[in-house]
Structure formats: structure tokens, C-alpha cells
């Protein structure tokens, strides 16, 4: 593997970036980071509180600074927040510093996997499906643009997705 031996996972909320990232890092003996969790740990506040206080723009500034910092590391798996790709700087950095895997999830998967989650500030709206559709329309082209490899996660186990990522890395054609 090249590009600093880093693997960056991008995709929408509910795609499984954090869960798959943890297992992938364990399997490959790499360190795992989740941008949302690191931001919460460092700020001592939940993402929803940061959104309330600083708005999405304030949160995205924190996220961009963290992506810059984490992309300097070597041998990591990074689960990015669903909106990290909105930043052109983040997309350029992720592309140049590691292998970017887009975990693609259907709208139905996203709805199902986030329905009980109260920690996602952008989904604290009346019509979650409409919001997810809007985010998908805005972000899907950005995920595709930055990705070296795309995996459709629907109906696949964590192990299957990890095996697909490893097979891609082993093929060394990125």
C-alpha cells in the first residue's frame, strides 16, 4: 500500500464508516480515528452542541483542521464525517495522502441506521427522509470524485466489506 499507508473512509451518515473503520484498522493493525469522535473528545462537547453554538460553518472549520492534522499521520484508518467532503481542501488532502474508499449506502439503509440516533444535528428535522435525500444529492458527486474505490454496502456484512477493501489494496492498482 502506498500514499502514507492511510485509508480514508467517506460516505453518508449510516454507511458504516465508523464500524467498518474500527474493524478494518484492527484487521490491518493500523490506528483508527473517527473525526466526529475526536472533535467531541477534544471539545468536551457533542457534535450537536457544537452545531447549536457555532453552526455548521464552525463545525466544518474544526473538522477541516482535524483532517489536516490526521492526514499528516501514517498508517491510519480514518472514518470521516458525512460532510467532510464538502470542503474542497479536505477532498484534495484525502486524495493525495491516502486511499479513499467510498462506502455507498442506499437511502433506505441511511434512514434505518439513523432513525434512533439523536446525535446527528442535521437529522433533527421533521422530515428526515427529505433531509437525507437532499444531503445525498449534494454530496454523492463529491464522494465519487474523491474515491479511489467505491463499495456498495447494502446486504453486505462488515467482514465482506473489509475483505473487499483488502482485496482492492492488495491488487495495488490504485
Image (spheres, helix red, strand yellow):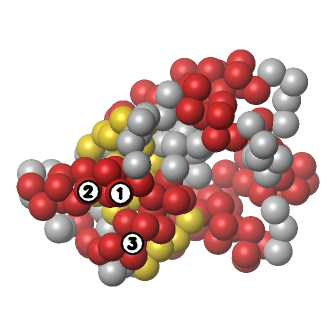
Give the spatial CA distance, label 2 vs label 3: 12 Å
Element assignment for label 3: helix
Q: Where does residue 108 sit, x and y in percent of width and height?
A: 58, 26
Taking the spot 10% from the left edge, 58% from the top edge, the residue there is: 172
Q: Left of 102 or right of it: where is 17?
A: right
Q: What x and y, as percent, mark residue 90?
A: 47, 52
- Secondary structure beneath dot 2 equals helix
- The residue at the point 17 percent across, 55 percent down is 167
Q: Earlier in the sequence, mark 2 or mark 3?
A: 3
Determine whether 57 is above or below 130 in the image: below
Disc 1 to disc 2: CB gap under 8 Å: yes
Q: Quadrant of residue 125?
A: top right
Query: What residue is pinned by disc 1?
Result: 159
| Pointer 1 with pointer 3, Cβ within 8 A | no
- Residue 96 is situated, as x and y percent measured from the top left of the image, at 30, 57
Q: Position of residue 87 (x, y in %)?
A: 53, 45
Between the residue at mark 1 and the residue at mark 3, the CA separation in whole angstroms equals 12 Å
The Cα atoms of the two marked residues, 1 and 2, are separated by: 6 Å
Q: Is residue 112 visible?
A: yes
Answer with mark 1 or mark 3, whichever residue precedes in sequence: 3
Left or right: 52 in relation to 172? right
Few, some or many C-alpha atoms within 10 Å of disc 1 (few <14, some 14-19, many ≥20)?
Answer: few
As drawn, 139 above or below 98: above
Q: Which residue is located at x 37 percent, y 66 percent?
A: 24
Residue 87 in sight = no
- Residue 163 image label: 2
Please name the residue that numbered disc 3 is placed on: 25
Amino acid at each position: 500500500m502506498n500514499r502514507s499507508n492511510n485509508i480514508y473512509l467517506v460516505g453518508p451518515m449510516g454507511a458504516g464508516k465508523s464500524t467498518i473503520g474500527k474493524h478494518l484498522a484492527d484487521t490491518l493493525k493500523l490506528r483508527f480515528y473517527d473525526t466526529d469522535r475526536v472533535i467531541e473528545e477534544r471539545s468536551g462537547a457533542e457534535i450537536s452542541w457544537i452545531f447549536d453554538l457555532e453552526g455548521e460553518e464552525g463545525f466544518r472549520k474544526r473538522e477541516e483542521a482535524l483532517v489536516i492534522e490526521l492526514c499528516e499521520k501514517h498508517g491510519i484508518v480514518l472514518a470521516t464525517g458525512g460532510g467532510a467532503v464538502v470542503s474542497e481542501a479536505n477532498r484534495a488532502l484525502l486524495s493525495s495522502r491516502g486511499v479513499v474508499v467510498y462506502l455507498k449506502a442506499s437511502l433506505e439503509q441511511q434512514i434505518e441506521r439513523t432513525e434512533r440516533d439523536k446525535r446527528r444535528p442535521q437529522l433533527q428535522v421533521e422530515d428526515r427522509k427529505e433531509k437525507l435525500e437532499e444531503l445525498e444529492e449534494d454530496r454523492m458527486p463529491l464522494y465519487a470524485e474523491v474515491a479511489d474505490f467505491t463499495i456498495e454496502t447494502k446486504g453486505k456484512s462488515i467482514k465482506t466489506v473489509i475483505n473487499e477493501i483488502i482485496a482492492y489494496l492488495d491488487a495495488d492498482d490504485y
